[in-house]
Amino acid sequence: MTLEKYRFDGTGTFDIKAFATAPPDEFKNKKDKIKEDIEHNIKTLSKVQEHLAAQKQYSVLIIFQGMDAAGKDSMIEHVMSGINPQGTTVVSFKVPTELELSHDFLWRIHNAFPAGGELTVFNRSQYEEVLVDRVHPELLLKENLPGIDSVSDVHDDLWTERFNDIKALEAYARRNGILLLKFFLHISKAEQKGRFLKRIEIPEKNWKFSLADIRERRYWDDYQKAYQEAIQHTATKKNPWYIIPSDDKWYSRLAVSQIINREVTALPLKYPVISEAQKQGLVQAVTDLKD
């Protein structure tokens, strides 16, 4: 599988329309083979996670963004299944609480960063504050920002500053041993419509449906523009974005699992080497166990 075509590292101009939402033709109608490959990838990640936890020098932060019904929840369910729940955390960022709004917009994000040896998954992330807030700038009024007393006070410089703040935080994380993997699950408007209809028509899926999602669908073009700007201005060579075709959920899961494995296995992970004193302690433990 060619994965580099999904990677954008800030070089050149990002055009969201140039990235496919459908899987390559050779992967269509190959669900059984795709599921086998995903299972293999999960087993590989599980082994690497053990090294990660033992060394405690590096950690992994996986970020999933996408339009409503892009498959973020099911992606986490399938790709993260089979790995050790100890040392793994999934954080879903919803509408900010009063406490979160009383702090800077990156406060809740930094608080959720993984400790050394841990793997953390963000379902939505810091990017909500340059996506939802950009489409609905009136939300910024709840943040009590200096100089922002009305929507008319929201200027383009604010978004540029937030992009720079996000890039700075991500660079800081990288310098401190956190591998960031940012995925945009890219679906078409037609595919979103189909998934919404399934949530309405299939009783077992009714609980997933929200009228709020339909209201937000009216802003499709605005969100696409916001994503284009956010990805363009926050992608770097060390912290790139991966734009994953997600009209086919199984293909998107395969692509994501392949990228995660490739990047995590590239970390210089190793089991800690114990000291001579610790080795002597092991010898003594064996002797004590003979009694």
Image (cartoon, grey):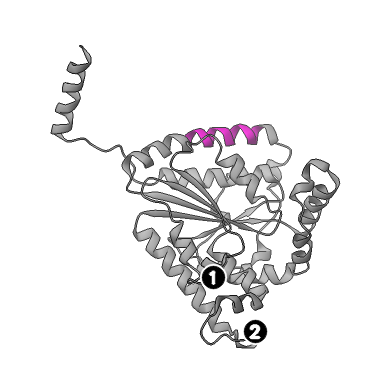
- Residue 244 in the image: state x and y as whole percent: 62, 53
Residue 96 sits in quarter: bottom right
Residue 158 sits in quarter: bottom right
Residue 18 sits in quarter: bottom right
Dominant secondary structure of the residues highlighted in magenta in the image: helix
Queried whether the magenta region covers residue 271, the answer comes back as no
Residue type at mark 2 is Val
The reply to whether the C-beta atoms of the residues labelled 1 and 2 are less than 8 Å apart is no
Residue type at mark 1 is Leu
Mark 1 or 2 closer to N-term?
1
Query: Is the C terminus in the top left, top right, bottom left or bottom right quadrant?
Result: top left
Q: In the image as oriented, which residue stretches furthest toward the top? A: 291
Q: In the image as oriented, which residue stretches furthest toward the right? A: 201
- In the figure, 265 relative to 216: above or below? above
Q: Which residue is mark 2?
A: 151
Query: Is the N terminus in the top left, top right, bottom left or bottom right quadrant?
Result: top right
Q: Nearer the viewer, residue 276 or 270?
A: 276
How far is the residue under mark 1 from the one under mark 2?
17 Å
Dot 2 falls on a residue whose secondary structure is helix
Quick check: 233 left or right of 248?
left
- Residue 260 in the image: state x and y as whole percent: 50, 46
Q: In the image as oriented, which residue stretches furthest toward the front? A: 98
How many neighbours does mark 1 have within 10 angstroms: few (below 14), some (14-19), or many (20 or more)?
A: some
Identify the residue shown where x is 42% and y is 52%: 114
Identify the residue shown where x is 60% and y is 76%: 142
- Residue 246 in the image: state x and y as whole percent: 67, 51
Q: Which residue is mark 1?
A: 101
Please state which of the two labelled residues, at mark 1 or mark 2, is closer to the viewer.
1
> What segment carries the magenta color?
33-44
Dot 1 falls on a residue whose secondary structure is helix
Quick check: 18 left or right of 119?
right
Queried whether the magenta region covers residue 40, the answer comes back as yes
